[in-house]
Image: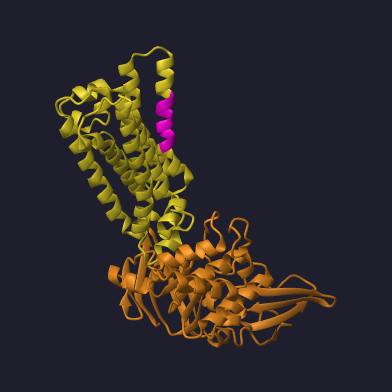
Amino acid sequence: MSLWRYEARRAGWPACLAAPASLLAALALAAASAGFGASPPSVHGVLLSGVEALVPLAAAMAAVTVVSVDRCRELQLALPAGYSVTLGRRLGVVAGIGAALSVLFSAALRLTGSWTGPESALASALVWASPLLGLTGLALLVAVLGRSVVLATTTVAVVWLCQQLFASALAAGVWSRPFFLFMTSRVGVADGWGTNRAVLAACGVLFITTALLLLRRPERLLTEEEV
Amino acid sequence: MDIMISGLRRRFGRVEALRGVDLEVPGGMFGLLGTNGAGKTTLMRILAGVLSPTGGRVLVGGHDLTTRAGRLAVQRRLGYLPQDLGLYPDLTTQEFLDYIGLLKGLDDDTARRRQIGELLDMVGLADVAGRRLKGFSGGMRRRVGIAQALLGDPALVVVDEPTAGLDPEERIRFRTLLAGIAGHRTVLLSTHIVEDVAQTCQEAAVMAAGRVVFTGPVTGIIDRAQGATWEVVTQGPPPATGVVVSAVGRPGGTHYRVVSPTRPDPAAVPVQPSLEEGYVALMREAVPS
């Protein structure tokens, strides 16, 4: 247990607070839109975007920080614990906080009648879990391959923003639809929703597995200056 | 824990950092000398399992470091103090050592904390055990570094440039600490500071341009400058030939100590060489300018 406490501290407060902050931002946006006279369905859409769009973005950015920043990296690489396992624990802490808050937030939305996502518990979890896996996996893979915080965060930001800006086109395209991150909040639980969630989750698992396999080669974690 | 290295090579893109290193390290304290860029840190990192070799073989205690299983087996018995030891500034000394102890697999809380207490006493940091690492001086950071390296009672301790940047008092203190931990262990000390090796090691190797150019007793390095070390006292410019190792200004003139295969000045007198002069002579042979 104490090792997990240390790893939570190593992940850092900003990474741990990113998910709660993003949900608070969603609440603030929803309150503001209600204040400006937006219709209840629009306000509910903003709240749903909190778990489907903002929490995954926060988790992905936090994952980049966790993988890219460590003052004791060289020492960690020489320890028998295995640095990829250590990073896995830190990522687990960040993802766990995001997941726990998303479950609670979704439950709160249900209780207040603001939930516009699917009814079943498993499907509800896929509203946030699939984009979280997909975006976090992409962030990790780029961070490990590029060994650059700037490259990884920029990639995540560009993908996220492009999907927001071209949501209609991406949701309409046969080939782009399975990879569209915001299907629930932008389109709803329509035809192809299940496929979309499954493809995003599978891509995320594939990216994360590849990143963790690459991390087993210690050199991947040392920057050019460190080498 | 014996170390046997043969034909070790490591390349970074177009740069070949290690060009076929052959070296045998017996137990006890062993010095690795070399200029900056000689390949010492790359060799240390390979021995610590941080980098993989491009070619060649490294056996540590019989474990092959070119395999994953071998690296893991060595890391279980290794204490490593890297050249740039970053510490986690938000942790206290006690917490940092506790965390590293957990990562080293010291799962018994009582035994781990007892060992941390003993190590803090040994490195003279017991009174700052509860202080955050943020704001520690260079010397204190290195002492935290050696304490973490000794957690789990490793059979092999690898320390890379541990005294660089320390003031003379801290350097002496750290050297004494290192010499004290050798005992039943193999301690590999990599440094470009000749004095560190002179004061702590009986056996040493010298690296230049990615190769080992000398292995043997430290006195063997001194021997390289026998008959090639001179003292010149002059009020004029330093001798034009040879390498001036030291220059001391005195009332009668400046006393120059020069390493040169031939008499550098008609007034030069041969003198007994020091380790530093032996090292200079060796480097001149290995890397002619």
Magenta stretch mostly in which secondary structure? helix
- Residue sitting nearer the eye, B87 or A190: A190
Magenta residues, start to end:
A20-28
Residue sitting at x 41%, y 71%: B108
Residue B81 is at least partly visible in this image:
yes
Instruction: Give the image location of residue B30, x and y in percent.
Output: 49, 81
Q: Quadrant of residue B194?
A: bottom right
Figure colour scheme? by chain
Q: Is residue A50 left or right of residue B187?
A: left
Q: Quadrant of residue B106?
A: bottom left
Residue B118 sits above or below residue A103 on the image: below
Residue sitting at x 46%, y 65%: B100
For residue A25: magenta?
Answer: yes
Task: Tally the numbered discs.
Answer: 0
Residue B160 is at least partly visible in this image:
no
For residue B110: magenta?
Answer: no
Residue B188 sits above or below residue A79 on the image: below
The chain in orange? B
The chain in yellow? A
Q: Residue furthest right?
A: B251
Instruction: Give the image location of residue B43, x and y in percent.
Output: 42, 70
Instruction: Give the image location of residue B29, x and y in percent.
Output: 51, 82
Residue A208 sits above or below residue B198 on the image: above
- Residue sitting nearer the eye, B125 or B257: B125
Give the position of the C terminus of chain B as an image quadrant: bottom right
